[in-house]
Structures are given as structure tokens and as C-alpha cells.
Amino acid sequence: MGKRILVVAAHPDDEVLGCGATIMKHIAEGDIVHTMIMAEGLTSRDLTRNAEMRAGELSELHAASKRSAEFLGVTKLIMHDFPDNRMDGVNLLDVVKKIEREVDEYKPDIVYTHHAGDVNVDHRVTHDAVVTACRSLPGESVREILFFETLSSTEWQMMTADKIFQPNIYVDVTEFMEKKRQALEFYASEMREYPHPRSYKGVELLAQYRGLTVGVPYAEAFMLGRSIR
């Protein structure tokens, strides 16, 4: 039987930016993938949060997440509505409980989530919540936790020793890079023009750089949080 994979992302599009090609590789190898998106998206663009004013755009963004998940081959997409870029104002326990519920029910073998040092506060809260929800209790199903990088957040952080992204796991995703680009096209409203890092060319250049580090055309890179063998 294949492995059970859980991807926990802060915002719609983070799951594709961070590990979209790896998701497709897992599925091609017979694994089952569930994705969780924690925050609603968009409302941080306003001075004051007003989800009702953004209701139409949010509906479109969430529909894009569903189409992208279907394209990737994800079995289950769970979407929550924590406030966009304001998750530091939410009790961490409330975020942990949402993730714990899915971990308890799904019992994933591998969990992917954000790097702890990202400049985006929602990424950091999501990281902390995943680490807490997947703590090593007796009988815990999670055997491996991996942290991904997210363009326009990870590389924008000041690279001090406690925040730098230092990958030590590389996945050869050469076969899936074109499909990753196509999956990002569902999120066209979130993409930007090059040289913005969150651009199609930016995504390709990062994958090329990670690939040349390990001698393949394209790779996605991760930091290993924990592995039990």
C-alpha cells in the first residue's frame, strides 16, 4: 500500500509553490495525498479585515484551490478560514486542534508544511501548529515531517542563523515541472510578473537551482524536521 501524505499550507497557492511537483510524484508512486489550507487569503490586502467585502474574490480563490487539487490528483482538500496574514492574532491552540483532527482521522505517514523562518507570519504559525499537532506521542502515525520553501516569503527573510532555509532533502521533480506550472495557472490571480519571485519564471529558476545542486534538471528542496526509521 502507498503512504499517506498530508500537506499543510497557510494560503491557497502555497501548497503548489512549496511542494506541488512532489505531491504529483507521490501520487504517481501510489501514495494518497490530503491537503489543508489554513487561512482564507486576500483579506490582508485591506486596512481592516472584511471578508464579506471580499466574498466574491474569496469564492473564486477557493474554487481555484479545488481545481488545482483535482489537477494535482489530491484525494481530499480541507479549507479553513483563519484570517489572512493575521494568524498571529489567533490562539495557536485553535490552529493546532484543526490539524490534530485531520492527523487523528487520516493518520498520515509524512507531513509537509512551511519552514519556520519564513517572513510571512501565517507560515510561521502554521509551522508551529504542525510541529505541535505531530508531536511524538506513543502511537503517533507521522514518521516524517518535511519543511518546504515558499517563494516571496522564505527568500525574503533576513538569513540569520536561526531563520535560514538549509535544505537537506531534494526530490527530483523533472518529470512534473510542466504540470506544476499548469497547477499554478489556476492561481493566476496570485502570480506576478518576473522578476517578482512568485512568477512562473521565478518558480522555474528556483527548481533549476535546486536541481543543479544535486545534478538533476529540476528539484524541490526540503528541510527535514524529523524522520523515524
Image (tube, rainbow, N blue to C red):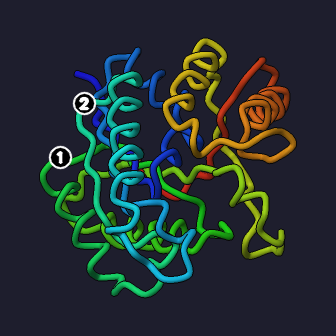
> Looking at the rendering, which quadrant does residue 82 occupy?
bottom left
Q: Residue at x 58, y 36 (%)?
A: 188
Q: From the image, tell me which residue sits under label 1.
A: 106
Q: From the image, tell me which residue sits under label 2.
A: 75
> Tag 1, which secondary structure?
helix
Disc 2 vs disc 1: which is toward the camera? 2
Residue nearest the viewer, comparing 53 with 22: 53
> Looking at the rendering, which quadrant does residue 29 occupy?
top left
Counting from the top left corner in percent of width and height, residue 174 is at 66, 16
Residue nearest the viewer, comparing 116 with 226: 116
- Viewport quadrant of the C terminus: top left
Q: Residue at x 38, y 54 (%)?
A: 58
Taking the image as drawn, is residue 135 in sight? Answer: no
Q: Amino acid at mark 1?
A: Tyr
Label 1: how many Cα within 10 Å (few below 14, some 14–19, many 20+): some
Counting from the top left corner in percent of width and height, residue 109 is at 31, 43
- Viewport quadrant of the N terminus: top left
> Looking at the rendering, which quadrant does residue 155 occupy?
bottom right
Q: Residue furthest left?
A: 105
- In three-dimensional space, the C-alpha distance between marks 2 and 1, rounded to whole angstroms, equals 12 Å
First of labels 2, 1 by sequence position? 2
Counting from the top left corner in percent of width and height, residue 191 is at 65, 41
Residue nearest the viewer, comparing 35 with 165: 35
Counting from the top left corner in percent of width and height, residue 206 is at 78, 37
Q: Amino acid at mark 2?
A: Thr
> Tag 2, which secondary structure?
loop
